[in-house]
Image (cartoon, rainbow, N blue to C red):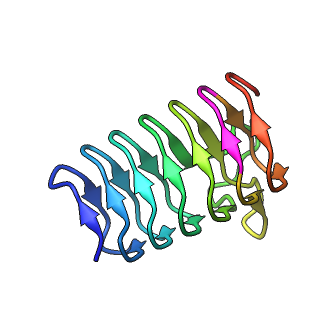
Amino acid sequence: MPLIHPTAAISPGAMIGRDTAIGPFSVIEDNVQIGDDCQIASHVVIKSGTKLGPHNRIAERVVLGGLPQHSHAPDHSGHLVIADNNVIRECVTIHRALKSTDATLIGAHNLIMVGTHIGHDCHISDHTIMVNNVL
């Protein structure tokens, strides 16, 4: 059973995995899937079109699945898929893909440090370390 703080705003259309904890003031939009045993800290925003695998640790003020920063971004952009066992630290932003049929992909067992931005359509492999403020 998920452990959801009473101040978190969770869309009824979001799927939250078993034993996942969601902290205060976090927002989980419609059409989001969060795997089992994830830890979502406070003030995290997970936007529509995001799929998060099991055993991920998401720190404060992270935004996952934001719209692509592109002057010709369509009304219906793509997806963000994050595999399992990642640590995503404070103030990281990861955007979903530009085209509705594509996905920004983050592999497994990554450490994404404070302030990193991963733009639309990026593919990050497994076992990477992205240091503070990588763009």
Number of numbered discs visible in the structure rendering? 0
Q: Main secondary structure of the magenta part?
A: loop
Residue 135 vertical placement versus 2 (above, below)? above
| 65 in the magenta segment | no
Camera-side residue of 63 and 128: 128
Camera-side residue of 87 and 6: 87
User: Is residue 36 toward the left or the right of residue 22 in the image?
Assistant: right
Which stretch appears magenta?
110-115
Residue 38's x, y, as percent? 45, 62
Q: Quadrant of residue 16?
A: bottom left
Residue 93 vertical placement versus 99 (above, below)? above
Quadrant for the C terminus, please.
top right
Q: Is residue 66 visible?
A: no
Quadrant for the N terminus, please.
bottom left
Q: Is residue 22 visible?
A: yes
Residue drawn at x 26%, y 43% is 25
Camera-side residue of 1 and 8: 1
Residue 69 vertical placement versus 51 (above, below)? above
Residue drawn at x 77%, y 70% is 101
Residue at the left extreme, as displayed: 6
Q: Quadrant of residue 22?
A: bottom left
Residue at the top extreme, as displayed: 133
Residue 131's x, y, as percent? 73, 27
Residue 2's x, y, as percent? 30, 70
User: Is residue 124 toward the left or the right of residue 5 in the image?
Assistant: right
User: Is residue 73 toward the left or the right of residue 59 in the image?
Assistant: right
Residue 92 vertical placement versus 35 (above, below)? above
